[in-house]
Image (cartoon, rainbow, N blue to C red):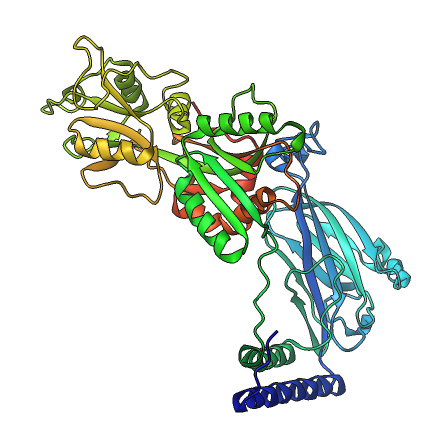
Amino acid sequence: MEWLFDPANVIAILSAGLGVLTTAGVLWYERRVPRRKRIGYRVQMDTPIGSEVSRGRANVRLGLFNETPDMADATLVLLRIENDGSQSIGDEDYTGRGELNGLTVEFTDRTVRGIAVTHSSDADHLMDHFTPAAGLRHDGSIIRLPRVPLNRNEHFKLLVLLTGSHVGGPIKITGGIRDGAVARNKAARPDEKPPLFGRAARSITVALTACVVTLAGIIVVRDDSPPPMDCATGTLTVTGSTAFEPVLKELEQKYEEECEGADIRLDIHGSNAGVQKLDDEGAEAGPAGSPSMIALSDGPRPASLTKLREKRVAISLFSLVVNDAVPVTDLSLDQIRRIYRGDIRNWNEIRSGTDQEIRLVSRDANSGTREVFQRRVLHHTNELATSSRDCATKDYADAPVFRCERNGTDAVLAKVASVEGAIGYTELRNGEVPEGAHRITIDGTTPSVDTIGSSDYPYQEIEYAYTYGSPPANSLVAGFLNYMDNYGEEIMRTNGHLACSTPKGMRLCGQGWAVPE
C-alpha cells in the first residue's frame, strides 16, 4: 500500500470516521428500540429424488423410487422456520383460526407424503409440540403447524417428502402473529443465523459506510480488488470445436482481464482434431501429469480415447444455410437426406422454376459440426465423396453430386454466400449469416435456445469439454472450466447454446439428452 498525505486525503479520512460513527449510532439505536415480532422462513433445499433424477453430467441414475411409479416425481424440500425478530413468540401470539392452528405451509401443485421435524440443539422442548394431538397434520398440498413457542433466534426445520410436480414450485407459509408478521427470508447457508438488525438499518449503515470508506480507499490507499475465486495462473491451450469458438473468444478475453497471470491460447481446428491432439499430448506427458489443455467437442469423443475426462458444457444449436439465389426457406428431413444422397441434384426438383444445380459446401472430416449433421440430420449416414476442391468446378464430370469441403465455419458461410445454388451448415451463433445467404428451417421448425428440450428440431447436440484425466483443483484447466460454468451462461445463450449450468440445461445435459430421430 502507498500512503499519500495531502488535504484531499485528510478530508477522506474524516469522511470515513464520520461514516463509522454514524454506523455505530444506528446500531446503538437498533439495540435500544425493540422491533416487531417476526417469524421468517427459508427454502434451504428443493431437490428431485424420484426415478427421473440423474446425477448431473455423469448420467448416473440415483432415483430412490425406481420401482414405485407413483413416486417417480418425488421431491424433498427442507424448510427452516425461525424467530428472527427481537422478541420471543408464545403460543398466545399466534392468531390463526382454531385453538391449535399456528402456521400453514402450502406446496402448490405438489402432494405432501411425509414430514420429519428437526430442531436446534438448544431447543429440545420444541419437539413436544410436533404431534397430531398438538395440531401437526397435513392434507393434500397443505401442512398445518401447531402453535410452537419460539425464543429469539430459535428455529426448527421441516423435511417434507412430496410428489406431483418437479422442483421449483411455489412454497408459501402463512399465519398471523399478534403485533408481528410472517415473511420469507432470502436464501442463506443451511444453518446461518438470522440477522441481528433490521433491514432498513442494515441497508442504511452498509450503504453509508461503503460509500465513505470507498472514497477514502480510492484517495488514500491503492489496493486492487481480489480476482474471482476461479482465477489461476499459467498457460492454457483450448482447442477443438469451431462451433464453440465465438464463446471461447469472449471467455478468454474476460478471464485474462480478471485473472492476472493467466495466458489462454485458442488453437481451434475442429472437434475431432482437438480431442485427438489432447489425447496425443496427454500420452506424451506420461507420468508428468495432465497437460494444460482443454478440447471442446460437438458431441461425445471417439470411444477409443478412454483417458479423456468429459464435462458437459452446453447444448448447441446448428442450422442449414443456402445461397440467396435459392428461393427456399424450409426443407423437410426427407428432402435434406435425398439432397445429400444425390437423389435430388437441382433446386427445380424442390421449387419449380428454379433451375440451379445444388452445390454442397461441407466441413472437413475434423469437424464436429459435420458429425452432428451426419448423425442427427442424415440419420447416421456419411456425406458423399468430395468432387470439387475450389467449390467452383467439378474435378471430374461424372461425379454424382457437386460437393466441396472447407475447414472452418466462416469459410463454409463465405462460400455458401458467394456460390449460386449452394447449401451448407453452421452453428447458430448469434443468428447472423453473411450477406448473400440465409438460414432455413427444418420441417417448419426454427432453431431456438428457448425451445431446446421441447422442440423436435433435430440439428442440435451436447457440447463437451474434455481434459486428459482429472486436472488438479488449483490448475488453470480447472479454473477456466469453473469460470465457464459460473460466468458463461449469457455468452453461450447469445451464441446459440444453452448452458448445462442453468436449471433447464442441468436437467437436459444430465439426462444424456437426445432429440427424436
> In the drawing, does residue 381 fall left or right of residue 432?
right
Q: Can residue 502 be seen? A: no
Seen from the viewer's position, the closer of residues 234 and 502 is 234
Seen from the viewer's position, the closer of residues 161 and 499 is 499
In the image, residue 450 sits, relative to residue 95, either above or below, namely above
Q: Quadrant of the C terminus?
A: top left
Locate residue 20: give its quadrant. Answer: bottom right
Residue appearing at x 45%, y 27% in the figure: 273
Q: What percent of the width, then of the height, locates residue 230? A: 59, 51
- What is the tally of numbered marks visible in this picture? 0
Locate residue 65: give its quadrant. Answer: top right
> In the drawing, does residue 232 fall left or right of residue 41?
left
Seen from the viewer's position, the closer of residues 52 and 296 is 296
Residue appearing at x 58%, y 52% in the figure: 231
Residue appearing at x 49%, y 45% in the figure: 264
Locate residue 344: give its quadrant. Answer: top left
In the image, residue 85 sits, relative to residue 172, either above or below, namely below
In the image, residue 61 sits, relative to residue 9, either above or below, namely above
Q: What percent of the width, then of the height, locates residue 417? A: 20, 34
Q: Quadrant of the N terminus?
A: bottom right
Q: What percent of the width, then of the height, locates residue 337? A: 31, 18
> In the drawing, does residue 72 fall left or right of residue 32?
left
Q: Can residue 260 be seen? A: yes
Q: What percent of the width, then of the height, locates residue 308? A: 58, 28
